[in-house]
Image (spheres, rainbow, N blue to C red):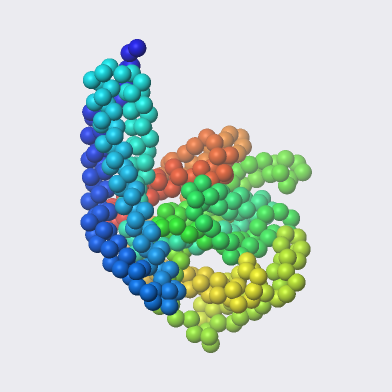
């Protein structure tokens, strides 16, 4: 039985080795091992959990670093295994072994490419959890329905990757869908990864809410913020906020809580308003709402600083505005307007298959940053 490979193993393996070596140079495994050793000493301390916030930070960072090293080591091990498989297959003219080697090669190419994208996330807050807000914009009930579909898309994306999520607040629209929703994606580099999703999303379809079956264009906005940490020092004096409590409600105004446990916080100096009704107690909802407020104040400070820098420029870069179109009629296509990445399967996209868009967005952003430097 003969086997004709569709790839040049020697060239492909050399390219992968070069890519992986470049990734290892960026990740710097030796410095990661040194940090792990230090964190392991902290974890072994008997008084670690006297400060629960610090203990969670230390254990989370340790887990993150170990997972990253394991991932790098796993890629290197798989590359070496393929090299052995190819040598064995060639020596023994074993078509089955060579076929398995080619299959594993394609899989490894995909995984190394994904890891390359991770190395492009070098922003100040890129390694944080993400706080995502989806809101309906122009388009009436279609926009509300679209916003809900986008929310589900991101929650499904997180589920596909095994990332925990927590919905803090959902404001339901009267007829269908949502006015807005805020949720957290809890994973290393969630902010850096999802931040390229920020902007205005556009949907074109035959409206299911139009009796005459006309085509409707609607819009939804996505904001992505980094979750704040203790070290961020976002000072929110009690005198700067107004706290209102109200009764949680679900779709159509149906009560889901018989007590006034939901909390709305207004930051008086900026006018920023956040609310949380996910938890059962008022105290928990206030704590969650304060975390959201701190994230938004952190982002406001970042944007104010960015605006000062942009005032010195004249390029008017606005990549974060309208960024993706979802067309369901008269043809089926989802296309990113910044990267030109597209797919003809909107159903898969709405079911959370958005890694291709995210990877293309991260690479595109890095190119833009390099060009502006």
Q: Residue furthest front?
A: 46
**Residue at horizontal 24 percent and vertical 39 percent from the top:** 17
Position in image of residue 19 (x %, y %): 26, 42
Left or right, 126 with reference to 216: left
Left or right, 131 with reference to 302: right
**Is residue 58 in view from this perspective?**
yes
Position in image of residue 244 (x %, y %): 64, 79
Position in image of residue 37 (x %, y %): 27, 63
Left or right, 222 with reference to 229: right
The one nearer the camera, 42 or 86, is 42
**Residue at horizontal 56 percent and vertical 58 percent from the top:** 134
* Placement of 94 over or under 61, stated as above or below: above
The one nearer the camera, 220 or 85, is 85
The one nearer the camera, 231 or 82, is 82
* Placement of 282 over or under 200, stated as above or below: below
Q: Residue furthest top?
A: 1
Residue 241, picture quadrant: bottom right
The one nearer the camera, 321 or 98, is 98
**Residue at horizontal 59 percent and vertical 51 percent from the top:** 152
**Is residue 300 in view from this perspective?**
no
**Residue at horizontal 26 percent and vertical 30 percent from the top:** 84
Image quadrant containing the N terminus: top left
Position in image of residue 363 (x %, y %): 35, 48
Residue 279, picture quadrant: bottom right
Left or right, 276 with reference to 66: right
Image quadrant containing the C terminus: bottom left
């Amino acid at each position: 039985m003969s086997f004709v490979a569709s790839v040049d193993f020697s060239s492909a393996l050399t390219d992968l080795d070069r890519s992986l070596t470049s990734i290892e140079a960026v990740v710097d495994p030796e410095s990661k091992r040194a940090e792990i050793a230090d964190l392991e000493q902290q974890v072994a301390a008997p008084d670690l959990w006297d400060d629960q916030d610090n203990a969670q930070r230390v254990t989370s960072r340790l887990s993150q670093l170990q997972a990253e090293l394991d991932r790098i080591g796993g890629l290197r091990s798989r590359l070496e295994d393929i090299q052995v498989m190819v040598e064995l297959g060639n020596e023994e003219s074993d078509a089955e072994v060579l076929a398995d080697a080619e299959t594993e090669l394609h899989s490894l190419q995909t995984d190394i490419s994904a890891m390359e994208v991770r190395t492009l996330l070098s922003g100040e807050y890129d390694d944080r959890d993400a706080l995502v807000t989806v809101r309906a914009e122009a388009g009436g009930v279609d926009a509300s329905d679209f916003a809900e579909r986008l929310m589900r898309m991101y929650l499904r994306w997180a589920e596909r990757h095994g990332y925990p999520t927590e919905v803090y607040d959902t404001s339901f629209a009267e007829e269908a869908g949502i006015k807005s929703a805020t949720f957290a994606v809890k994973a290393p580099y969630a902010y850096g990864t999802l931040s390229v999703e920020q902007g205005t999303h556009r949907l074109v379809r035959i409206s299911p809410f139009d009796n005459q079956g006309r085509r409707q264009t609607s819009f939804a906005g996505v904001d992505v913020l980094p979750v704040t940490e203790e070290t961020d020092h976002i000072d929110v004096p009690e005198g700067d906020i107004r706290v209102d409590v109200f009764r949680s409600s679900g779709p159509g105004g149906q009560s889901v809580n018989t007590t006034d446990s939901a909390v709305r916080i207004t930051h008086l100096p900026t006018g920023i308003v956040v609310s949380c009704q996910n938890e059962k107690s008022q105290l928990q909802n206030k704590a969650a709402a304060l975390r959201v407020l701190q994230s938004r104040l952190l982002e406001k400070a970042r944007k104010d600083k960015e605006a000062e820098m942009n005032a010195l420029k004249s390029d008017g870069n606005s990549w974060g505005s309208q960024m993706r179109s979802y067309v369901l009629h008269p043809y089926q296509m989802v296309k990113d307007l910044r990267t030109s990445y597209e797919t003809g399967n909107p159903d898969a996209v709405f079911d959370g298959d958005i890694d291709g868009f995210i990877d293309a967005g991260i690479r595109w952003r890095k190119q833009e940053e390099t060009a502006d430097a």
